[in-house]
């Protein structure tokens, strides 16, 4: 095959065969095709798109470029993936809850991407081991019913190389490329069913319902074509999820949540995702799953499992949080009508709780606390949040926190709907 002919073909909007897409991925991954040709091919996809069969072929080609994880475990193995948001600690809560129900939940997770937090960074705040071999994952799942571990360099190396080029050529936003990137890693584990939590809003990568719907539909459809049961929820991310954002703070909140002290928004999203997995696996209805998850969380049944799991992998559940705190007070009275989650995410990075460059070290102790959300009425001078910091100018941090909030003296809004759509 001739690479430039495949560029022309896709540029013209023609459909590529599975063999042609495999050739593209392999020739680029193994250094036969130069960056400039692959960049042209990615741009052709950006403008012309891929249908679901082409997206599956791209996914499988990237998946086959590395290793897959075959776990020797009994029971129904399930997975959950989030597209990322501010304060999104759902994985930390849902995994032990699923295990408490009898599912096996071997989750692979990543580090922070852009302004959103990463599950692996959060777990590393405890000092626990996060990079596990297949045998170690199997051992942990057998002992605790779940595992959350880091995606290794050996999983879908083609995706890593292609993603770097997408970032450099402004083709990251292409839905088929996002779908294939996510699934080339998530399909590497032999689970029966997967639920996708596709975030939408200012604190997410997908800013509109239309974008989020296209992504959710693509993830579900291609997963099904691969042979996996799949469903998705589109959930609210116009404001942080839960009470805290920041690595160690989110572990602390997860332990509180699993003990029964959980915010309404975090409970709604977590239990709804469990509901989808119930429906997919035949365990029961969506409502059955929500009800069961809610009972387990509020009863505190799963917290001991979560704590023992952290300790088994060498971590300390009582994570350190920054001793310095600065209260953020409302400058005027009125209703909170808007919160810019992306600005808050970048504030956490400025505090030291995220990365500007891939090799940056993270201060796990810093972060934000939220007392008020969209729809809440506040008095002038009333606390709306808190900033946990180790160094820097607290007044500057307060200014940036407040700039993310819009307070109106006249306009009254209601709290946003948390679960926007279910796609199965």
Image (cartoon, helix red, strand yellow):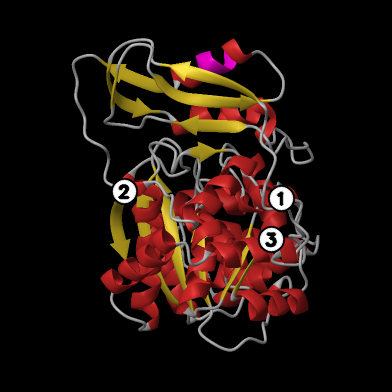
Q: Which residue is mark 1?
A: 126
Disc 1 to disc 2, how far (Cα)?
29 Å
Q: Position of residue 88 (x, y in %)?
A: 50, 47
Q: Nearer the viewer, residue 252 or 164?
A: 252
Instruction: Identify the residue at horizontal 53%, vertical 80% (top origin).
Output: 77
Disc 2 to disc 3, how far (Cα)?
30 Å
Work out which quarter of the rendered image holds the N terminus and state it. bottom right
Q: Main secondary structure of the magenta part?
A: helix
Task: Say whether disc 1 or disc 2 marks the residue closer to the N-terminus.
Answer: 1
Disc 3 to disc 1, how far (Cα)?
8 Å
Q: Is residue 160 left or right of residue 193?
A: right
Report helix, strand or loop for mark 3: helix
Q: Which residues are magenta?
A: 396-400
Q: Which mark is residue 310?
A: 3
Work out which quarter of the rendered image holds the C terminus and state it. bottom left
Q: Position of residue 62 (x, y in %)?
A: 65, 67
Select label 2 or label 3 by which is in front: 3
| Residue 6, quarter of picture | bottom right
Instruction: Identify the residue at horizontal 58%, vertical 11% (top origin).
Output: 395
How would you rate the neighbour count of disc 2 (Cα within 10 Å): few for under 14, some for 14-19, many for 20 or more? many
Q: Which residue is mark 2?
A: 418
Report helix, strand or loop for mark 1: loop
Task: Say whether disc 2 or disc 3 marks the residue closer to the N-terminus.
Answer: 3
Q: Are marks 3 and 1 in contact (CB under 8 Å)?
A: yes
Instruction: Identify the residue at horizontal 55%, vertical 66% (top origin).
Output: 183
Q: Is residue 413 left or right of residue 298?
A: left
């Amino acid at each position: 095959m001739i690479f430039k002919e495949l560029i022309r073909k896709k540029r013209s909007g023609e459909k590529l065969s599975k063999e042609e897409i495999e050739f593209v991925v392999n020739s680029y991954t193994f250094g036969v095709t130069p960056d400039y040709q692959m960049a042209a091919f990615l741009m052709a996809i950006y403008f012309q798109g891929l249908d679901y069969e082409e997206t599956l072929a791209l996914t499988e080609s990237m998946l086959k470029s590395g290793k897959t994880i075959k776990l020797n475990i009994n029971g129904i193995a399930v997975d959950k993936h989030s597209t990322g948001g501010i304060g999104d600690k759902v994985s930390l809560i849902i995994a032990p809850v699923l295990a408490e129900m009898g599912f096996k939940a071997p989750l692979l997770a990543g580090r922070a991407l852009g302004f959103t937090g990463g599950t692996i960074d959060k777990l590393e705040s405890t000092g626990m081991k996060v990079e596990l071999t297949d045998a170690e994952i199997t051992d942990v799942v057998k002992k605790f019913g779940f595992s959350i571990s880091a995606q290794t360099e050996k999983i879908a190396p083609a995706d890593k190389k292609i993603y770097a080029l997408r970032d450099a050529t402004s083709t990251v936003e292409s839905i088929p490329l996002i779908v294939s990137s996510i699934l080339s890693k998530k399909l590497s584990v032999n689970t029966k069913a997967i639920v996708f939590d596709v975030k939408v809003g200012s604190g997410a990568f997908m800013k509109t319902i239309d974008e989020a719907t296209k992504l959710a539909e693509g993830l579900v459809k291609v997963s099904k074509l691969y042979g996996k049961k799949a469903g998705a929820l589109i959930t609210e991310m116009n404001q942080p999820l839960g009470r805290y954002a920041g690595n160690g703070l989110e572990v602390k909140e997860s332990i509180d949540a699993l003990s029964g002290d959980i915010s309404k928004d975090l409970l709604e999203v977590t239990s709804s995702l469990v509901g989808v997995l119930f429906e997919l696996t035949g365990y029961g209805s969506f409502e059955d799953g929500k009800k069961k998850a809610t009972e387990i969380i509020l009863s505190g049944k799963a917290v001991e499992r979560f704590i023992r799991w952290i300790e088994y992998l060498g971590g300390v559940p009582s994570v350190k949080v920054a001793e310095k705190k600065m209260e953020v007070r409302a400058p005027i009275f009125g209703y909170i009508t808007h919160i810019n989650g992306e600005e808050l995410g970048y504030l956490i990075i400025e505090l030291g709780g995220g990365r500007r460059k891939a090799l940056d070290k993270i201060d796990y102790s810093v972060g934000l606390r939220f007392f008020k959300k969209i729809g809440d009425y506040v008095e002038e001078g009333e606390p709306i949040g808190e900033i946990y910091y180790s160094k820097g100018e607290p007044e500057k941090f307060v200014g940036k926190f407040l700039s993310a909030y819009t307070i109106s003296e006249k306009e009254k809004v209601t709290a946003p709907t948390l679960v926007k759509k279910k796609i199965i």
